[in-house]
Image (tube, helix red, strand yellow):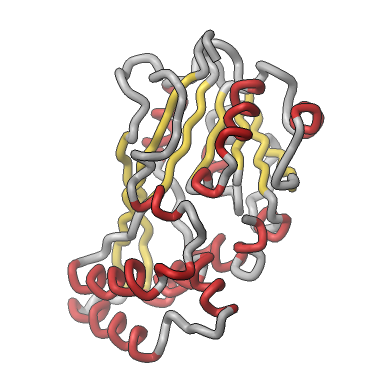
Amino acid sequence: MADLFIEQAKQYSEGRPSYPEELFQFLASKTPNHDLVWDVGTGSGQAAASLAKIYKNVVGTDTSQKQLEFAPKLPNVRYVCTPPKMSISELEHTIAPQCSVDLVTIATAMHYFDLPTFYQQVKWILKKPSGVIAAWCYTAPEVDPRVDSVFGSLYYVDSRPYWKQGKDLVDLKYETIDFPFEPVDGVDHNGPFEFKAEKLMDLDGYFTYIRSWSAYHVAKGKGVELLTDSVLEDFEVAWNADGKSQKIVTFPIYLRIGKVGLSN
């Protein structure tokens, strides 16, 4: 996964949305203790920065050192570049001891993971029975019908051959992803629960978001420019139709959340 985000790390940090406060307050309400979070696939720290406002300590890990360079430096956040695979002993040495983590978060990254191996690590490192795992993703951004129509053609048709395996899990809102965890207190299922992120963007910022896609850079490496002159023109016409240069772009978010319980 790290190779996908080396070239566009700066674009990723600038173009991707922050996650809403409501999401983190919901997570905090489901963890009895707020001592330690492991934010896996932290990227440029979008989730870690918000978690650090609620939890005493956050360990943000990613396989891309380039991504981590753009993460915000905060006194209670420790960033670690990790290999794609870690043994339990490496996990203990690098992240935290067994049964010591209150919350494991994965923000728009778990569809890339080797889930059976990762879940073994999660069950080993989370406190029992109250430790919580929370994984979320966001789907296609929503602007208005005109812009969304142009985007749909680009995303669902033109870019489709260049996405890595697992992207379908995102399009299906993580509903079908394997998630073998008990419901947290107060709810009777483990999701997905819906939230939304909003980001004020001009058209250049919107293009920065598109150019941060892994699929955009995979296509570029194969000599294919997804944002052709024709596509750019279609976006410009749609974006400027209402005369407003800045727009609220909404990213629907879908959360799976569960606890390890005593049986895991």
The residue lying furthest to the bottom in this view is 229
Question: Residue 40, located in which quarter of the rendered image?
Answer: top right
Q: How many marks?
A: 0
**The N terminus: image quadrant:** bottom right
Residue 48, can we see it?
A: yes
Quick check: 194 left or right of 215? left
Residue 35, can we see it?
A: no
Picture residue at 58% right of the left edge, 35% below the top: 52
Quick check: 107 above or below 157? above
Image coordinates of residue 186 in percent, x first then y, are 33, 15
Picture residue at 28% right of the left edge, 84% below the top: 234
Nearer to the camera, 115 or 58: 115
Nearer to the camera, 140 or 11: 140
Image coordinates of residue 139 in percent, x first then y, are 35, 53
Image coordinates of residue 217 in percent, x first then y, are 55, 73
Quick check: 167 above or below 52? below
**The C terminus: image quadrant:** top right
Nearer to the camera, 218 or 235: 218
Quick check: 260 above or below 72? above
Picture residue at 31% right of the left edge, 71% below the top: 151
Image coordinates of residue 92 in percent, x first then y, are 77, 26
Picture residue at 32% right of the left edge, 88% below the top: 233
Quick check: 161 above or below 254? below
